[in-house]
Each structure stands twice: as C-alpha cells, then as structure tokens.
Image: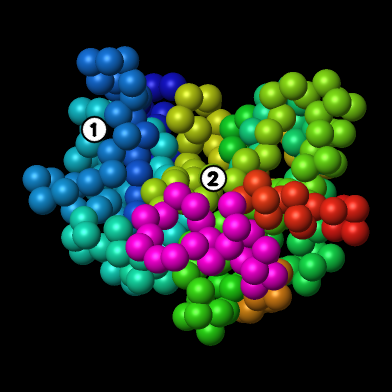
C-alpha cells in the first residue's frame, strides 16, 4: 500500500473520530512499515526524548502523529486494553492504581479462509456472555484475519473497579469465559479443519489492540466493527480501504451489566498473573483452579 493511500485513509474525518473514540485515555502504539536493523517493523509508543506515552485525544492528533513519524512510514494505530486516569509521564503506565478501566477482549486468531470457524467461535463467546447478563455492551471487530470480541470497559461499574483492579477483572472475565468454552473451540477447529484457530487471553498491562478503522499492519484492509446480527453476512468487501462498511454503534453499552460475571470470574480465576505484585497469593495456582472448577457440573 502506498504512503498516499495511507494518508488519504487517515485524512478521513470519520476515521479520525473513530480512532479518537477508541483511543481516548489509552496508551497508543503506532505500527510502522519501516524496519529496524534486525528486520523488525518499528512500533512507536513514546514521544520525544522525555519518552512521553503516546496519546490521542482529538482528531487532529492523527495526522499530527503521522507527520511526526513519517520517516518510519506509520500505518496502524493501536490502543491498550487499559484506560488510564492520567498519561503525562512514563511512570503513569506502571502504576496499577492509575488504571481507570480495562476492556475485556478475546483475540480470535485464524486464517481468513476459515472465517466461518471464526464466526462460530465468536458467536459462542457472545452467547455465553449474553446468557450471563452482558447483552448490550459487546462489540466485534474484524482484525484482518480473525476477530476481536470486546466488552465495553464501562460495563464493569466504577464501584466494582474501586474494589478490584480493573485489569484483574478484565483478565479474569476473559480467562473464565475462554476456559468454559475451550471444548467448544476445539470442536469448531476440528469440524472446520481450522488448524490455525486460537482464542487467546492477551490481557496484560502493555497489550495493544487495533483501533476501529485502523489499517491492518500488513494487509490492505480496514479493521471495521461488525454488528453482532451481521456476523454471518460479513465479507472481506466490508474491509476495503476506499469503500469500507463499518458499525458506528460499537461503543453502545449498559453501565454495570458485566459486574456479576466479572466478579464471579475473579473469584474463580483470580488476578492477572503477569502483573508485578508484592502481596501474598490469594488463590491457588491456575492449573489447580482449572482442575477444581472445570468439573462436569461446570461444563456447558
């Protein structure tokens, strides 16, 4: 894809507005086409010698950042699962009390040729969430090859987030759901011969997810959001760079509707294991938790 096409896409005001809607108060990353001396694409996450965390808070920030990093050929915008109270210095990123909210996200990785398997896995997750009381706060994003299933971060109430770290709640909700559905994912993989199908929990303190309407980092496609009732109708034509089809209502949500499942998941799974903590373990190791809680009475 030429630099002109990239710039034309990101000059679209509606594209800029969607990136801002998703990126507000998140730590931003920009994937670039230019590679370093070891052959790896540059991923920009800081600004200037002061290493200020990258932020996007208004539409004009998008072309501004493209201009600043033009020599690296910027292409894809990402944002953390975490939403922060402040992002004015590097230390803010590693203060767990600075996390205001976190977006639970299931990463369905697959080949686009096996999209039907991706859709079925997505619908299993959505069905489980809806049966657990989360009905209006789910959105789906085409990731270029697979899909991301998100629960809006405000579906977990401020009151619950005050008691339990938001990152722990998001991690536990994703992991609990994934474990409950793993047998179904395995069945989907076998029925579709989808050897590449994986449903991962990638929630951690630095993880990035593609912004809605960002370009894919390698493929000439737009990462569009898809209405849940249109998943079976989605085709690659929706992701055309110059003629994309996008669900603009992706951020609809009901505050607090994920509280019950998030708290239950946290009680079973416990906190995110990748976080640095200086406290006594409150839960047994994860493998023992799985053995204990995935008994026949817990299998759907």
Q: CA distance from mark 1 to mark 2?
A: 29 Å
Residue 90 at x, y percent in the picture: 21, 56
The image shows residue 259 at horizontal and vertical percentages of 65, 75
Give the crowd class for mark 1: few <14, some 14-19, many >=20 residues within 10 Å.
some
Q: Main secondary structure of the magenta part?
A: loop
Q: Secondary structure at mark 2?
A: loop
Q: Could you tell whether 201 is left or right of 217 in the image?
A: right
Residue 255: numbered disc: none
Residue bearing the label numbered 2: 202
Where is residue 217 drawn, in percent x and y? 45, 30
Picture colour scheme: rainbow
According to the picture, the residue beneath numbered tag 1 turns out to be: 70
Q: Is residue 12 above or below residue 243?
A: below
Where is 206 relative to 83, above or below?
above
Task: Tell me what residue is drawn at x 23 percent, y 46 percent.
Answer: 46
Does residue 109 appear in the picture of this structure?
yes
Lateral position of residue 56 relative to residue 173, left or right: left
Q: Quadrant of the C terminus?
A: bottom right
Magenta span: 263-285
* Residue found 49% across the figure and 46% down from its top: 209
Q: Secondary structure at mark 1?
A: helix
> Mark 1, mark 2: which one is toward the viewer?
2
Which image quadrant is residue 297 in? Answer: bottom right
Foreground of the two, 184 or 86: 184
């Amino acid at each position: 894809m030429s630099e002109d096409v990239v710039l034309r896409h990101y000059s679209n005001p509606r594209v800029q507005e969607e990136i801002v809607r998703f990126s507000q108060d998140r730590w931003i990353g920009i994937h670039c086409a230019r590679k370093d001396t070891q052959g790896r694409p540059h991923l920009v996450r800081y600004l200037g010698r002061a290493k200020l965390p990258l932020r996007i808070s208004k539409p004009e920030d998008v072309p501004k950042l493209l201009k600043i990093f033009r020599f690296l050929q910027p292409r894809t915008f990402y944002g953390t699962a975490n939403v922060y109270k402040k992002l004015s210095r590097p230390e803010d990123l590693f203060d767990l009390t600075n996390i205001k909210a976190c977006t639970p996200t299931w990463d369905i990785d697959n080949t686009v040729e096996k999209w039907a398997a991706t859709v079925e896995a997505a619908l299993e997750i959505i069905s489980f969430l809806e049966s657990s009381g989360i009905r209006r706060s789910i959105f789906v994003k085409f990731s270029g090859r697979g899909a991301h299933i998100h629960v809006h971060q405000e579906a977990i109430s401020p009151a619950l987030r005050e008691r339990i770290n938001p990152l722990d709640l998001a991690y536990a909700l994703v992991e609990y759901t994934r474990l409950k559905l793993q047998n179904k994912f395995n069945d989907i993989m076998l029925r579709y011969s989808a050897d590449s199908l994986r449903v991962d929990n990638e929630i951690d303190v630095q993880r990035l997810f593609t912004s809605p309407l960002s370009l894919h980092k390698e493929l000439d496609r737009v990462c569009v959001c898809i209405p849940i009732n249109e998943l079976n109708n989605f085709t690659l034509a929706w992701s055309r760079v110059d003629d994309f089809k996008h669900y603009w209502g992706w951020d609809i949500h009901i505050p607090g509707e994920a509280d019950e499942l998030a708290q239950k998941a946290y009680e079973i799974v416990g906190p995110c294991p990748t976080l640095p903590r200086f406290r006594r373990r409150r839960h047994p190791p994860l493998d023992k938790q799985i053995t204990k809680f995935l008994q026949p009475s817990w299998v759907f």
